[in-house]
Image (cartoon, helix red, strand yellow):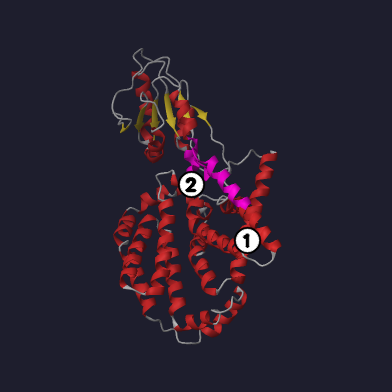
Amino acid sequence: FVSYAQEARPYSLWVLLLTLSGAVLLWALRRNRPGQWVLYGLLVALCAYTSLLSLPVLVGQGLYAIATTSRWGSRWLGTYRSSARPLSSSLSSSLNALSFSGRMDNRARHALIALGLGLLTLLPWLLLALGRWDTLQDNTTWMRAGMDWPFRLIIGLYTLAVLVFDVPVAPLGSPALLMEVVIATGVVAIFAVAVWALCRRAPVRVWLWVVLVSLPTPLLLLGLDLVLGGQRSTAPRYLMPVHLGLILSLAYALSQGWVDRRAAVQQRWRWVAIALLCLSLLSCGLHWQRSPKYQKTRNLDNPAIAQLINAERSPLLLAEPDETLDILSLSGELDDDSRIRIVPTDSVIAAIATARSLGSCQASILIFNPSAQLQQQLIQLAPNGGKEVFTPQRLIPDELALTLWQVGPDPTRCAQGSGSWGTGDKLQRWTVP
């Protein structure tokens, strides 16, 4: 959360809105006043506009409202109101409860009306997204890239552990990496014990809320990966509802252990709380002025690429239109004398020829993250064909990453000059005659 709070991205706001919407819903179900339902509907709209992945969470909230206010839900939940039954016995008893009338009281109707009106405000955005579906698909290409299940499992466990233990991954085969794996495994084990304690000992109204707001989003993403292929479920930023559920489970387990009558149990949970607090403070300190890899993904290499570009004299950076967003991310770290041109793929070679003929022999021509088709053209470019000057480190072979290529000057056509490639803003479209 500290890492996301430093970025101009919506995920910290998303966590806040999910928390507020849940709190207001529980408040409204308890008090059932019009102003509370209006506030809940407003928060539903804000959640939906902040992230479309709020929709599964909001569906879970609606199901919770129905389960806790309908007649069969009250019958089921009322059985466990005075005693905390385990999850298994609760689920086995729910089948009998379904035989009763499913009639809802006005709280459930108010909740569904507020939820429906809040989601209705999203309709204009959905129409706009459908009208630009091709652009949306192009911006989410990484989601459809395949990933082997061993890597998916490792990333899934890492996604859970970073909630408390978030440190840079050590080099493969090093003792530091082994220590990180042991600590991360211990953290995940503590989360598992906390979830078990919640479902085993907490009243059904408590664990049902945690389950319905934290599981729909990962189950949806995992189902899409299984049916369509891809790696949607491996993005930590998409699993914020799961993190919220783990925090609630951990808070319950720590609070119960802290007041346990057995001194040994109290001592054990106190040491767990101290260890988790130390790991969290360590993680926050390490990421105070840096971004973790799971947050930046391919843009994590921006500083290294910018350092290479800034080391050149009057560099000209060419990029294809598909790289516009990544260029925007990179441009803030480039020196003022850098020139950036967005060039259609089929015009890059002509742009290089034009730049060679107009620029000085000392000026550099760089190509930002060329496509596979353009890479082949650069290799075959003569004389002084293109070469890759920055190769990123990939966790898996198909991981998306940014590269940088350089083309040398043409000794037969190089004109002596000032080395300037023109003036203007850093980001502009350059058309080649």
Compare residues 340 and 385 and report the one nearer the observer: 340
Asked whether, in this view, residue 329 is left or right of residue 239, the answer is: left
Residue 126, picture quadrant: bottom left
SS of the residue under disc 2: helix
- The range drawn in magenta is 274-301
Q: Residue at the location (54% across, 69% down)?
A: 207
List x then y, in percent, for residue 97. 52, 84
SS of the residue under disc 1: helix
Q: Residues within 10 Å of mark 2 (few under 14, many from 20)?
A: few
Q: Main secondary structure of the magenta part?
A: helix
List x then y, in percent, for residue 313. 41, 19
Residue 198, picture quadrant: bottom right
Sequence-earlier tag: 2 or 1: 2
Asked whether, in this view, residue 360 is left or right of residue 79, the answer is: left
Residue under pointer 2: 2
Residue under pointer 1: 192
Q: Residue at the location (34% across, 14% down)?
A: 418
List x then y, in percent, for residue 356. 38, 20
Work out whether 183 lies above or below 288: below
Q: CA gap, disc 2 to disc 1?
A: 24 Å
**Amino acid type, mark 1:** Ala
List x then y, in percent, for residue 82. 56, 79
